[in-house]
Image: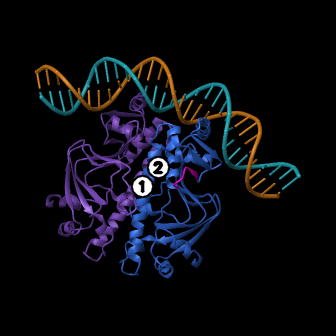
Chain colours: A purple, B blue, C orange, D cyan
Amino acid sequence: MKKYIPILKRTQLFSGVGEEEIGAMLNCLQARLCAYKKSEYVLRQGEHTDTLMVLAEGKLHIQRDDYWGNRSIINMVSVGEMFGEAYVAPESGALMNDVLAVEDSIVILFDVKRIVTVCPTACRFHSMVVQNLFFAISEKNRQLVQKLTFMSKRTTREKLIAYLSEEAKRSNSSEFSIPFNRQQLADYLSVDRSAMSNELCKMRDEGMLEFEKNRFVLHDDVTE
Amino acid sequence: MKKYIPILKRTQLFSGVGEEEIGAMLNCLQARLCAYKKSEYVLRQGEHTDTLMVLAEGKLHIQRDDYWGNRSIINMVSVGEMFGEAYVAPESGALMNDVLAVEDSIVILFDVKRIVTVCPTACRFHSMVVQNLFFAISEKNRQLVQKLTFMSKRTTREKLIAYLSEEAKRSNSSEFSIPFNRQQLADYLSVDRSAMSNELCKMRDEGMLEFEKNRFVLHDDVTE
DNA sequence: TCTTTTCTGTTGTAAAAACAACAGACTTGT
DNA sequence: ACAAGTCTGTTGTTTTTACAACAGAAAAGA
């Protein structure tokens, strides 16, 4: 557990909190570790949970398969990011999604009720963590809205442009990598993989962009 | 301002807080009122804000018009619901959406920094409001994910079924009203209005559902 | 190294959506 | 009561997507 304190220190949740204080809070928040192999499920749709989780190693997808087997990737979780925060409210009900480890992963679980309900003066940095948590959820909120703006586009091409432009903006460069392979990107944007692949190649042939594997270069006429 | 205390008392944000305490907190949180006529913008995309807002009267849409004039309704705000919570973090950047009054509306603004950053022992119920705020944002998060699951469906029919089933579930009845007219529903689901209208009528002719204006009745084969 | 599996691009066909244009019903405001 | 405007359903055409099937390249595993 101790070995992950440096990772936790760099997370948004513990931003501004020193390593010693984090060590103390791990007890206070009853932190536990859980390991998952690639392709294992961390959580499954329909389950109940009331823990806040932070990814310490690996990579996760928050996703949902519907009755017909169509997969929709809601979001991606990278090291240092948290998940489960939407289900800590008492009446939040069952999980709407699966959480899948797409790489071998290590997850840190926190008893979030202790973060929010225990008097914040209990430990010195508690109120700072509450504030961080608040900001982190707000940001996740904006991420979801961002994703909605990709998905609200009518054509596959528009969805691709919206998504790729955002990734370019996020990396401050017209050249960047995406965290998905083709099938995953299609699942993320909720389009057909082959149709998307087709569209990407058309855009490349029209000179809008270049790509190789998951590395993309947008040309000026795309970014505006 | 005082006249809205009963409304505030019934909001998720002030749940569990008495009317006198709310009155006291209005000062503490520097609450202000703002009125908007139907079709006026409460906030515009690109602006900056750091206030938390609660709708006291009327109805709002959180939406976005793209370059080509396609409107996408991200969410709807009813009386007692809050909005703006995603932009209170210091580095949250410019608003991604417009907020439009679809009816004459009254909005209450709060200086949210005082909710989150001021020592929660300042006033007695402060920590309860912090907790309420946390739960409220969590719930909004789930709402957005819910919407993503509608939008991730590939066909208009599937989107309609996903949305209408959810509304039925929410009202615990196969008969319910929706808060949108046809154009607004199409904007909410990001589909073409006439195609959607067409699809709705086909579904009605196939006996899946009935409707009249914004009142719907789902038949058994839809809900399962 | 060789085999197996995964990933990506390609094509053709069928299905669905977008778009445009219009008519009748219903509202709203004067 | 009337006129103007809005809302809803309807139809036909064009565009786009979904789906299925396949082949070569790349990666993973034995």
Please state which of residues B87 and B188 is positioned toward the viewer in this rendering: B188
Seen in the image, is C7 located left or right of residue B74? left
Residues drawn in magenta: B171-177
What's the residue at 64%, 57% (across, down)? B39
The residue at which mark 1 appears reads as B142
Q: Quadrant of residue A70?
A: top left
Choose the circle earlier in sequence order: 2 or 1: 1
Task: Work out whether residue A205 or residue D2 is closer to the camera in this orientation and state it.
Answer: D2
* 3D distance between C-alphas at marks 2 and 1: 9 Å
Is residue A58 depicted above or below D11 in this figure?
A: below
What's the chain of the residue with tag 2?
B
Is B174 included in the stretch rendered in magenta? yes
Q: Secondary structure beneath disc 2?
A: helix
Discs 2 and 1 carry the same chain letter:
yes
Q: Which residue is mark 2?
A: B147
Give the answer, above or below, for where B122 lies relative to A194.
below
Seen in the picture, residue D20 relative to A179 is either above or below; the reply is above
Residue furthest toward the front?
B220
Which residue: 47% across, 47% down? Answer: A149
Identify which residue, B58 or A132, lies in the foreground. B58
Letter of the chain that mark 1 sits on in the rendering: B
**Residue occupying the point 30% across, 64% down:** A112
Amino acid at pointer 1:
Arg
Q: In the image, is residue A197 above or below residue A58?
A: above
Mark 1: which secondary structure?
Answer: helix
Crowd tier of the residue under label 1, counting other residues whose Cα lies within 10 Å: few below 14, some 14–19, many 20 or above: many
- Along the line of sight, which residue is nearer the eye, A106 or A166? A106
In this picture, residue B211 sits left or right of residue B132: right
